[in-house]
């Protein structure tokens, strides 16, 4: 090796040419330029923004969105009453799906029963229902109504109960008069009996004095008895007449009750049948008529014509409101990552019909976020101006149900922060969580055995501790028994995690708060402990930690004793 080094000719022409030539500028300043470029990129990373974006589909409508008219039944279109882009009003019939009912007859019936203030028992109203209507699915309800209507009319036309009641009332009047005559007759009989009684008393006196004979006395007595019997008979006749009169009154009351019961029964049956008819007619209208729910302009979703077949669930027409209100966008956001959403966050909207590379995009902000998800999706609303002007200066014409993609910027952090966040997370994880040491099964079993400290030994240990704190960490249920001997007035916190970074602790507070825990941050020894539950009762703490460990499937949850 030394011989080869000695054989190198340092003064050869080739070596002298290389060593005597001055390097070019790009070589001389290359290192400086590379260093400057690296420095500029590094410095720029503090200013260049790298946003955190959530992407989701968006549909742009107005606050009074267009109404879709969907077919409820299969069949051909019997009638189409409108044309594309025609103005329509609320409850206007746009088309009819073919069915067994005659449309004119069903429409006539609908107009007859549509009045809310109508009296279903009015004779003029009931006479307006003909027997010749062809109503298809409504026919059974209509036939039942007609039968009950006929029965009701017959009941009213016969007028049996009112006539019979009127007859009995007239009879009661006559019987009352007869009862009065019988009473007058009884009064006369009473007077006659009184006279006969006086005569008998005089005859008795004369008979005792032997003025009259025995035969005359007996004739006077017989006359008294006959008049008495006649008086009693007349009184009996008066009582019987009054009884008949009371029975007649009772018959009238019974007939009135029966009449009221049957009349109400006919009315209730007729009214129930009428309501069933209206309900069936409403079902027919909803199933076979295509009706506009709002005022606006009708748009055909497909080329619909008479006799064209449609299936249930097909969107036949769309009615666009005539007056445009506030334009809003509804973003359908998946539940994953939705926790980053906040109001007033920036949103960039790219419409599918207008490529953003050519027309640009609309910028707005989040106005509202749904409180609960529906089918694991949140609805995020944004407000848009009346004129949709993109960042490229293009004016986009608004149309209902414009579809596109929304980019929600949740965080707009510098590039340097984005680069160092993963490293920061790794460092925090290793600093916050000590490494897990593997132990043998035998040592693990030994560690689970609780060996109580002696009170003196426990006190000596505390006195030797260099850091006396009023907060003691208890990692398992067994050590809780030891610490409880020292002081009884302790607060037992069930801890789900310990953090150095307050920001990370607050994020986990939100996570556990959403699960229904009363979360509290306990600050001790420069660490933030996440308390899910606290109590002054040791037994309650032991019971609670078992339940929380089971519900969270986390055996690392522990108990902190705070004095």
Image: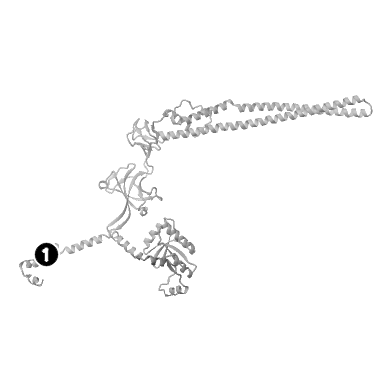
Using the image, determine if residue 361 lies above or below residue 112.
Answer: below
Q: Is residue 425 left or right of residue 99?
A: left
Viewer-closest of 24 and 422? 422
| Camera sees residue 112 | no
**On the image, numbered disc 1 is attached to which residue?**
23
Query: For the point 91% across and 29% down, which residue is it?
Result: 205
Q: How is the image coloured?
A: one colour
Q: Please count the marks in the image.
A: 1
Query: For the point 82% across and 26% down, which residue is it?
Result: 227
| Camera sees residue 19 | yes
Q: Which residue lies furthest to the left in this view?
A: 13
Mark 1 neighbour class, 10 Å CA radius: few under 14, some 14 to 19, many 20 or more: few
Q: Which residue lies furthest to the front in this view?
A: 442
Viewer-closest of 17 and 540? 540
| Image x and y of residue 152, in percent | 55, 28
Q: Can you say which quadrant of the picture contains the N terminus? A: bottom left
Using the image, determine if residue 83 lies above or below residue 328.
Answer: above
| Image x and y of residue 466, in percent | 40, 74
Query: For the point 43% across and 73% down, which residue is it?
Result: 461
Kind of element beneath mark 1: loop
Using the image, determine if residue 471 lies above or below residue 87.
Answer: below
| Image x and y of residue 100, in percent | 41, 29
| Image x and y of residue 221, in percent | 87, 27
Query: For the point 54% across and 33% down, which residue is it?
Result: 268
Using the image, determine if residue 329 lies above or below residue 413.
Answer: above
Viewer-closest of 389 and 281? 281
């Amino acid at each position: 090796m030394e011989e080869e080094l000695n054989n190198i000719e340092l003064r050869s022409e080739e070596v002298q040419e290389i060593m005597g030539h001055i390097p070019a500028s790009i070589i001389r300043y290359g290192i400086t330029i590379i260093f400057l470029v690296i420095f500029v990129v590094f410095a720029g990373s503090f200013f260049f923004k790298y946003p955190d974006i959530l992407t989701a589909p968006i549909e742009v409508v107005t606050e009074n969105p267009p109404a879709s008219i969907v077919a409820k039944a299969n069949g051909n279109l019997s009638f189409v009453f409108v044309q594309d882009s025609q103005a329509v009003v609320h409850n206007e019939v746009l088309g009819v799906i073919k069915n067994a009912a005659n449309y004119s007859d069903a429409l006539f019936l609908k107009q007859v029963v549509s009045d809310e203030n109508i009296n279903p028992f009015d004779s003029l109203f009931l006479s307006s229902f003909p027997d010749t209507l062809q109503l298809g699915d409504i026919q059974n309800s209509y036939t039942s109504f007609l039968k009950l209507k006929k029965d009701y009319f017959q009941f009213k036309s016969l007028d049996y109960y009112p006539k019979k009641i009127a007859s009995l009332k007239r009879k009661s009047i006559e019987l009352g008069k007869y009862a009065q005559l019988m009473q007058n007759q009884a009064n006369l009989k009473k007077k006659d009996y009184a006279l006969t009684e006086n005569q008998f008393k005089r005859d008795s006196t004369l008979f005792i004095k032997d003025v009259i004979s025995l035969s005359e006395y007996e004739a006077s007595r017989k006359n008294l008895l006959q008049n008495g019997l006649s008086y009693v008979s007349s009184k009996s006749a008066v009582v019987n007449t009054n009884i008949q009169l009371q029975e007649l009154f009772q018959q009238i009351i019974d007939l009135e009750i029966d009449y009221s019961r049957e009349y109400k029964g006919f009315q209730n049956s007729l009214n129930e049948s009428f309501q069933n008819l209206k309900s069936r007619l409403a079902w027919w209208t909803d199933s076979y008529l295509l009706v506009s729910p709002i005022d606006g302009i009708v748009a055909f979703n497909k080329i619909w014509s008479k006799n064209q077949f449609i299936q249930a669930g097909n969107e036949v027409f769309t009615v666009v409101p005539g007056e445009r209100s506030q334009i809003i966008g509804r973003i359908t956001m998946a539940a994953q990552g939705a926790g980053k959403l906040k109001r007033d966050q920036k949103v960039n909207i790219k419409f599918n019909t207008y490529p953003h590379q050519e027309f640009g995009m609309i910028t707005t902000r989040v106005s509202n976020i749904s409180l609960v998800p529906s089918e694991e999706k949140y609805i995020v609303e944004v407000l848009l101006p009346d004129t949709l002007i993109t960042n490229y200066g293009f004016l986009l014409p608004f149309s209902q149900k414009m579809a596109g993609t929304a980019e929600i910027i949740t965080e707009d952090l510098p590039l340097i922060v984005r680069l160092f966040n993963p490293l920061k997370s790794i460092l925090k994880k290793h600093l916050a969580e000590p490494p897990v040491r593997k132990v043998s099964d035998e040592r693990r079993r030994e560690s689970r055995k609780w060996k109580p400290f002696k009170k003196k030994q426990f006190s000596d240990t505390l006195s030797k501790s260099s850091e006396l704190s009023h907060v003691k960490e208890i990692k398992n249920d067994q050590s809780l028994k030891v610490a409880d001997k020292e002081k009884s007035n302790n607060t037992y916190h069930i801890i789900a995690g310990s953090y150095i970074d307050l920001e990370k602790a607050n994020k986990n507070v939100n996570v556990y708060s959403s699960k229904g825990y009363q979360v509290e941050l306990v600050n001790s020894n420069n660490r933030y402990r996440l308390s899910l539950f606290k109590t002054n009762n040791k037994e309650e703490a032991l019971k609670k930690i078992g339940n929380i460990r089971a519900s969270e499937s986390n055996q690392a949850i522990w108990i902190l004793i705070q004095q």
